[in-house]
Amino acid sequence: MATYQPAPFTQVGRPALVRGPGDWWERVELITPAMCGPNSLFVGQLGDWTWDAVGAACHLDPYSAVDPAGNPVYLSFAYFRVQACRELSVEQLTFGDRLRVRSKVFSCGGDSVLTVHQVSRHDGVSGTALSGDTAGTDDFFSYDTPGCLHVETFNRWIQRSGAGTNHGLRRATPVGFRIDHLEQIADEYTPRRIMSNVRRAAGFRSVGEPPPQVRVTLTYQVSASRDLNGVGLLYFASYFSIVDWAVLQLWRSLGRSVAGFLRRRVLDRQVCLVANANADDVLDVEVTMYRDASGEEVVDVSLRRGQDDSLLAVARQRITPPAN
């Protein structure tokens, strides 16, 4: 009987990925100081792992992607979700933790892809082969694998519409990008419906939800020294950081301590990213919260450009607050 031999993939300068059954890619990562904390550093790592997985699955280098005219093209994040579990949440990660990261890239039609990651603590067994590990798509979207973070990112290729501005980014496809060989994501799992509803409603609220019990409005100045990435765009992980800043302001408005904020557990993070911003933009931020029947706090955040009221992003967090 033949033994399955996983195929490695190495992007020059990046850790090797191991390809296993069902086109799942695996890596083992050590959590370093630059990858964790009460900030967006770990989310940024998830973004890097998405770029690596898309590069491996779609046969290109996403870090140097260009269109046929040689203009830069970037893999953007239109929707991002991080679901925690009882055994593992983003807030628990710290120096020295070793994680097993399993990733798969699906076709979503056109040049769009859905990348999913299943992140768990590494058991210390040497090697990263996936032999015998045949969890399928349905298993991932049941979100009930013990000890795992379940991460979804909906990705599109974009480029600037003009020099000197991050407004009006447009779709573009890089040279060499292939998705015809990828598994097509089932309609029941595509985030397109979620994104369509979120854009239409400018939020994640649905019919029948309780009205907000708390509402806070804020103003945020985009920081040229903190919020931009290496190509001058508002970094996707900065959206998460701005959302957390807004949640902290809500927390303080309720008379709660910063220590309590740091002890909270975010069970589910969802962000729909609609547009980008320039380094001198001022954002209007609205934060609302209600407590659901289970006792979880549901916090919604919207970000708009102040000068034209255009929607940049909406987010939802489901939070288990500390006992005291």
Image: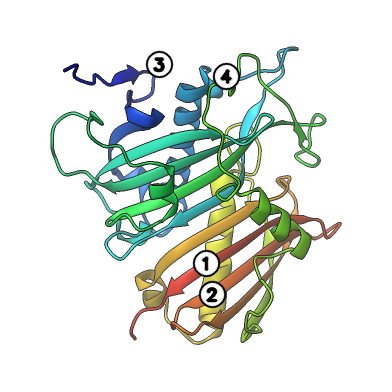
What residue appears at the point 26 percent right and 31 percent down from the top-left corner?
Answer: 130
- What residue did someone put label 4 on? 64
Vertical relation: 286 (above or below) 111:
below
- What residue did someone put label 2 on? 298
Q: Quadrant of residue 282?
A: bottom right
Residue type at mark 3 is Val
Q: Nearer the viewer, residue 265 or 87?
A: 87
Which of the labelled discs sits on residue 12, or is there none? 3
State the separation of the CA atoms marked 4 and 2.
39 Å
State the separation of the CA atoms marked 3 and 2.
42 Å
> Do tag 3 and tag 4 residues touch (Cβ < 8 Å)?
no
Q: Quadrant of the C terminus?
A: bottom left
Q: Nearer the viewer, mark 4 or mark 2?
A: 2
State the separation of the CA atoms marked 1 and 3.
36 Å
Residue type at mark 1 is Gln
1 or 3: tag closer to the N-terminus: 3
Percent of width and height locating residue 66? 66, 18
4 or 2: tag closer to the N-terminus: 4
Residue type at mark 2 is Val
Q: Is residue 301 left or right of residue 5?
A: right
3 or 4: tag closer to the N-terminus: 3
Vertical relation: 44 (above or below) 127:
below
Q: Is residue 285 left or right of residue 310?
A: left
